[in-house]
Amino acid sequence: MKFVFIAFVLFILSLDLFSQKIWIEGYDIIDTKRILYKGDSVTALYQPKGLVFVNRNHFSEYFTGLPDSLPPLPDGKYLLFTFDLETSEANLFHEWYMKDGKRDSLWIIYHNDGSPFEIRQFRNGLREGRQLKMDDSGKVVADYFIKDDFLNGPAFFFDENEVFFARGTFNNGAKTGIWTYSDSPDSLTDFHIIEFYDTLKYSCIRQTFSHDTLKEVTYFRKHSQKTFIDGKRLKPEKSRMPKKKPQPKPDVFKGVRFSDDLSDIDTTSFDAFNKIISYLKNNPETKVELRFHSAYPNENFTPKWILVVDKYLIRQGVDPSRIFLCYYSDKVPIISLEKINKIRNSKKRERLIRKNQRIEYLIIKKG
């Protein structure tokens, strides 16, 4: 009888360990469960691989994974896995801790190969402490500290565009003291730049050296600057605002039909995707961004028809790494609800609402 009782208790614990469901609304978590990870009981969340979100209010471009702030979750350790819908392979993506319903301690984001990409320190839901970022080879490309919501203390950055390593100090978010820029992470090379901040007369003085010889000096004030090259002042050029490149507009797949309740896609609509599939096969250097729009706010975290379309393209031979999924819910309608609500005829109103549910595509060319 004693063994039966022990077995029953273990069974109940296993149910709690492997069946706990925790959902984070709006980030397409397809499953959660309790698992054992490095000997600890943790909560694992699963997200479709290659899923991309757009939030123009907070991010200039696309972002994946989960944001800094999360809804209140039970205290403990959490793991976020990316789940390949075709192969059922799961890869660790994020690792973090919750305390008193907020992020706390470390938040680690991983590269696809499992090596750390970013290591962030949190305290009471806010970034606080040392922040690290690594490249694919494991080299540190950013190392800085945050205190009281500002950059504070020593900092190190690698600028990929300028191929420069920058070192200096922040004070309440502003550069202070001496900053150096060089193509070596450890020393000042033949060509390097030294900046002096918080001077009495100028906000910054920048000195540019070539072969240890001072070649250029620029004095910055709040609304002006003066530059001297080999001791001669450079006349300022009239600044011209660069023209913004027009953003490409996506096309809408024609012939896509949905079920009466808009919860699923009619499989007879798959012919609408074949033209793009053929284009991708004939142009292996290109990728495709699929944008999904629903007519109504979707209470399910991953609408079924999104995954169905993704899986169809993969089965037709398109590499998953070339497919980017963006889900906008009902946030970008073709016809606004304000206009639709002015229509008195209910059938016509419903027909206009259905037009907002659509799938768009944008071809991404290399470079």
Image (cartoon, rainbow, N blue to C red):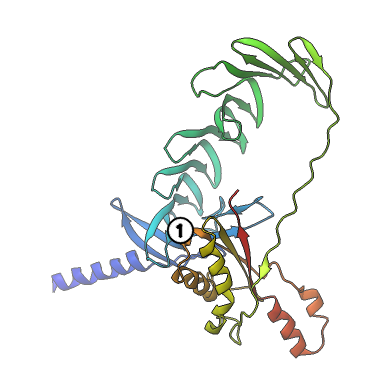
Q: Residues within 10 Å of mark 1 (few under 14, many from 20)?
A: some
Where is 312 relative to 148, above or below?
Answer: below
Picture layout, residue 227 above or below residue 325: above
Residue that appears at 52% across and 70% down: 302
Check disc 1 and report the residue beneath it: 74
Residue 66 image offset from top left, x and y in percent: 53, 55
Residue 26 spot, x, y in % from top left: 57, 64
Q: Residue at x 52, y 43 (%)?
A: 123
Q: Position of residue 293 (x, y in %)?
A: 64, 71
Q: Quick check: 133 above or below 83? A: above
* Residue for point 62% across, 14% down: 210
Q: Foreground residue, 278 or 195?
A: 278
- 12 versus 190 height, above or below: below
- Figure quadrant of residue 32: bottom left
Instruction: Name the image quarter holding the N terminus.
Output: bottom left
- Amino acid found under the numbered disc labelled 1: Pro
